[in-house]
Amino acid sequence: MAYIDGFVAPVPTENRASYIAHAEEAAKLFRQYGALEIVECWGDDVPEGETTSFTLATKREDNEAVVFSWIKWPDKATRDAAWQKMMDDPSMTPQDMPFDGKRMFWGGFEPVLEA
């Protein structure tokens, strides 16, 4: 069964182009290690919440947009092996990211419905 890694992060709006370039480079690695699909979404209609919201969860600032993305893997075993290989890959050394990674959150998800 497929497996999904999901990510949410605040990105300064002035960094949109550099974020896309960063995501394109990362997508090449994800594909190399077995990802089936990589989707990056730039927040367009993201309501402000009072209790919970993407904005609150990322502590989004006025000059930032929320990015929502996911990677689809064939299965959890492929995903786990891929992440281990990427962590061992010298090209994955820390680099300047066009967003505050401390406010990014992510998780792995087992799909229960694909329609």
Image: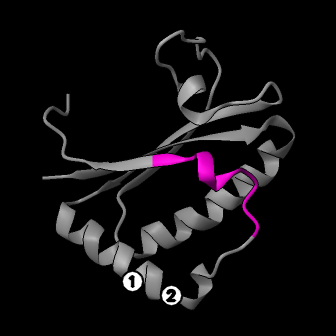
* Residue at the spot 60% in from the left edge and 24% down from the top edge: 55
Find out whether the residues at labels 2 and 1 contact each other: C-beta distance under 8 Å: yes
Residue 95, percent from left and from top: 72, 73
Against 86, residue 90 (above or below) is below
| Label ID, residue 85 | 1
Q: Position of residue 26 (x, y in %)?
A: 57, 65
Q: Is residue 101 magenta?
A: yes
**Res. 74 image quadrant:** bottom left
Q: Which residue is mark 2?
A: 89
| Range shown magenta | 96-105
Q: Residue furthest front?
A: 51
Amino acid carrying mark 1 in the image: Lys
What amino acid type should be assigned to the residue bearing mark 2?
Answer: Asp
Reply yes or no: does residue 14 show up in magenta. no
Where on the picture, by quarter, is residue 115? top left
- At label 1, counting other C-alpha atoms closer than 10 Å, the crowd grade (few under 14, some 14-19, many 20 or more) is few
Q: Nearer the viewer, residue 28 or 66?
A: 66
63 or 76, nearer to the observer: 63
Vertical placement of residue 59 versus 90, above or below: above
Q: Nearer the viewer, residue 20 or 59?
A: 59
Q: Secondary structure at mark 2?
A: loop
Residue occupying image coordinates x 44% and y 67%: 31
Residue drawn at x 13%, y 35% as measured from the top left: 112
Residue furthest to the right: 14
Q: Position of residue 61 (x, y in %)?
A: 76, 29
